[in-house]
Amino acid sequence: MTLVVSGIPVEVSKKKIKNMHLYVKPPHGSVVVSAPLSMSDEAIERFLRTKVGWIRKQIVKFDDQPRQTDREYVSGETLYVWGKQHYMQVEYGIKNSLLIHGDKAVLTVRKGSTTEQRGNFVKEWYRELLKAEIERVLPAWEKRTGLKVTSWQTKYMTTRWGTCNRNTGKIWLNVQLAKKTLECLDYIILHELIHLEERNHSERFILLMDKYMPSWREVRTELNGQTLDYME
């Protein structure tokens, strides 16, 4: 269900919880509220109206973040890989490839390829890059925390860096994490692992985050402050 409060669309999700939880989520500043099953829509709307000022301030933070321009996948554009900026150099060949050399990202494509075709290749390149890193990092966090996933998957998401299903034990990670620093990936993996045990951002959730990653607040700020890509 979506409520529009003072011109702001808010995604409302009713769950078996005692208290209401309000979030303004990266990367685009979408507004989400979780409310108890017994709470009426009118009560939720009244609550949101008291928070409009705070919500607008949070949305502005996301609006003010630096964003890359619309993609054409031509020489001179920038490409972020693990938080580092690279300058794209497009070459033509028989087989698509993307190789990082210092501050250059050499993209080889077939001559006559469209922007969409190039974009699809780059997106899947990012996916494979992220998957390889998850395979390396996730087992280490599972061993450290004693929390294990049943399975994981990558996908492009517009409102979340990661999500989990506590019932199945599966987690999803946003492919765009491959553009952020490795610390950001660590943070999101840990965040979702702990959510497998703690549904909400409870006191125990915070204590566990503090235990395993004392600097998680700084990493979260870093993640949400990094350049956002236009393509999603």
Image (cartoon, helix red, strand yellow):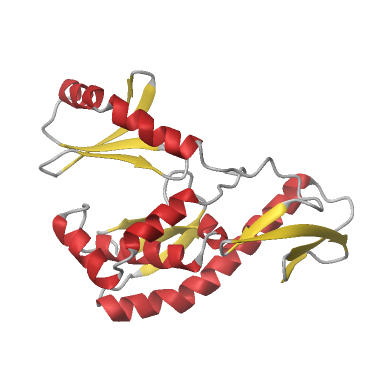
Horizontally, residue 104 falls left or right of residue 33, namely right
* Residue situated in front as seen by the camera: 14 or 162: 162
Image-based side of 209 in relation to 183, left or right: left
Q: Which residue is at 17% across, 54% downward?
A: 202
Name the residue at 20% across, 24% down. Answer: 41
Q: The C terminus lies in which quarter of the figure? A: top right
Residue 1 visible at all: no
Residue 181 image point, x, y percent: 51, 64
Q: Position of residue 114 (x, y in %)?
A: 80, 47
Q: Quadrant of residue 187?
A: bottom left
181 and 160: which is toward the camera: 181
Q: Quadrant of residue 92?
A: bottom right
Is residue 14 visible to the viewer in this orientation of the structure? yes
Left or right: 44 as drawn, with respect to 188 = left
Residue 151 picture location, percent across and down:
38, 68
Q: In which quadrant is the N terminus drawn?
A: top left
Q: How many marks?
A: 0
In the displayed structure, would residue 215 be above or below residue 176? Answer: below
Residue 42 location, quadrant: top left
Q: Is residue 9 left or right of residue 50?
A: right
* Vertical relation: 145 (above or below) 38: below
Residue located at (13% from left, 30% from top): 39
Image height of 168 relative to 22, above or below? below
Residue 74, percent across and down?
80, 50
Q: Nearer the viewer, residue 169 or 182?
A: 182
The residue at the far top in this view is: 6
Q: What residue is rendered at 87% in x and 65% in y? A: 94
